[in-house]
Image (cartoon, coloured by chain):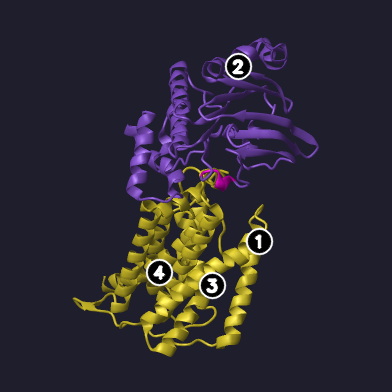
Chain colours: A yellow, B purple
Amino acid sequence: MDRFVFLLSTGLARGAVLALFALSLVIVWRAARAVNFAQAAMAAVAVYAAFAVTAASGSYWLGLACGLATGALLGAAVERGLMRRLPHRTPLPGMIGAIGLVMVLQAGLAIAFGPEHRPMRAPFSERPFVIGGVPVLSPYDLFVLATAAAVMGALALLFTKTSLGLRLRAAAFAPETSRLLGVRVPRMVTVGWTLSVATAALAALLSVPTELGLSPHAADLLFVDAFAVAVVGGLDSPLGALAAGIGVGMLSGLVTGYVSASAAPLAVLALLTVVLLLRPGGLFAAGEARKA
Amino acid sequence: MTTTTPPPPRLEVCGIEVAFGGLKALDGVSFTVGDGETVALIGPNGAGKTTVFNAVCGLVRPRKGHVRLAGRPAPSKATGLLAAGVSRTLQGLGLFDRMTVLENVLVPLSSLPGPATRKASKARAALADLGLAADADRPAGTLPYPERKRLALARALVTGPGLLLLDEPAGGLGEADIADLAHTVRATADAGCAVLLVEHHVDFVMDVADRVVVLDFGRVIASGTPGEVRADPAVEEAYLGLEAAS
């Protein structure tokens, strides 16, 4: 039982990060109808920026802020400079462009910083609190959970309660009609990419200290799991990303503990397969797809 | 030459020609709509009525001719219509089904400057004018069809346009709803808005229009008051004749 509680609680922290990264994929999907396969490499660039700033200044928080800003700028730059210029009749050019970008970014990072794993320290202790003899969440886990919850709450408010959010949703669901109503759709697509990559950068920044360390591939596994999460939850659904993120995080925590760490990705893939077979739109898919 | 030039019309369509590949959809179409005037664009299916709308909205570019709004060139992109004081409804309505009724009406206001509370009260007033106040917080996708059409109209009117383009506003409506619609159109024109509408419903057109422009195969074949147009033999042959025969 102790073991079960411990595994669930570590799964919860991992799930929060997964949900955050999956949410970033949902945001860009809604804004641009594209799955950004370069999300992990772009997030890694942001983490390197944070790492460099933290190393130079000694401040984790300054590094975090610079990492988020780098992610946001990179999102806008990639949308304006690359994605917008590709043909949009089929999803293929966007995918190939993104995969090319992954190679360029990861090779660039390896050239600039070296290919090895660099240890990245968490700003809080990673030793779990022990409650009633059971090790549960660490202070850093609590920080991750609180940050993820705050950012997801802020994004939910942005999308549902603000004028910018209304325009983002309008442009996402009916771009042609939105243009007639004065919404600058291309600008909304750029804003979507900016928010998305900044969110992905935050997820990667939160997850890297709990793993092997920083490398150009540091966010790759996170992307694979988060992509499964986004699809399981329904690519259009922020709520789906949250629920599926927590669920998948706990599932892989339990499988890691009771079976083996190498079985966890298989369990996630099995879940993805079952959902795709039974409910291909995802668990939280809305009834109707986007028009025009 | 300083005093007597009248103000330019709200909408001036001058000799526009639009072609899709080899097919001339519009061939030298000209007409005007003045402030406070309601003009109906009629004609058989495929005559080019919606293409005229699309040319005014910057969705298709005319090969020749020009569109002017109050003397200025019409915006070349659809996004600029709002600032130019032009609102349009669509045949397919184009509502955001997953947003609430109120949010649908807020979308055109969201790109304009001003405090959010003012916009919200403006949007609620526009909904109240069309009898949708009680539905403000419902998802638009759950409204019945006549209410959906009224919501599309409210969304077009909320910005206080100088030119209102209505694409088949009466289509699919029953008699009582059409009477309400006619009342709204008249009130809008009386407030000084220029109204251009495409419509198949002849009684509605004859009721609300000050002038009627008849298109056939991309050309204007007649224009004038409803009475004049109704009596025009060319119109009878091209359009009303077909209606009667079908």
Query: Could you say which quadrant of the image residue B148 lies in?
Result: top left
Residue furthest to the right in view is B22
| Residue A40 visible at all | no
Label 2 environment density (alpha carbons within 10 Å; few <14, some 14–19, many ≥20): some
The residue shown at (34%, 70%) is A147
- Residue A235 sits above or below residue B212 on the image: below
- Say the numbered circle drawn on residue A17: 4
Q: Which amino acid does label 1 sit on?
A: Arg
Q: Nearer the viewer, mark 4 or mark 3?
A: 3
Residue A52 inside the magenta-drawn segment: no
Residue under label 3, please give it.
A42
Residue under label 1, please give it.
A85
Q: Is the magenta stretch mostly helix, strand or loop?
A: helix
Compare marks 3 and 1 and give the one earlier in the sequence.
3
Q: What residue type is labelled 2?
A: Thr
Residue B80 inside the magenta-drawn segment: yes
The chain letter under disc 1 is A
Of residues B172 and B240, the one drawn nearer to the viewer in this rendering: B240
Label 3 environment density (alpha carbons within 10 Å; few <14, some 14–19, many ≥20): many
Marks 3 and 4: in contact by CB < 8 Å?
no
Task: State how far apart marks 4 and 1 are (Cα).
Answer: 31 Å
Same chain for marks 2 and 3? no
Element on which disc 1 rests: helix
Q: Nearer the viewer, mark 4 or mark 1?
A: 1
Compare marks 4 and 3 and give the one earlier in the sequence.
4
- The answer to whether A47 appears left or right of A94 in the picture is left
Task: State how far apart marks 2 and 3 are (Cα).
Answer: 64 Å
Q: What stretch is highlighted in magenta?
A: B78-82
The chain letter under disc 3 is A
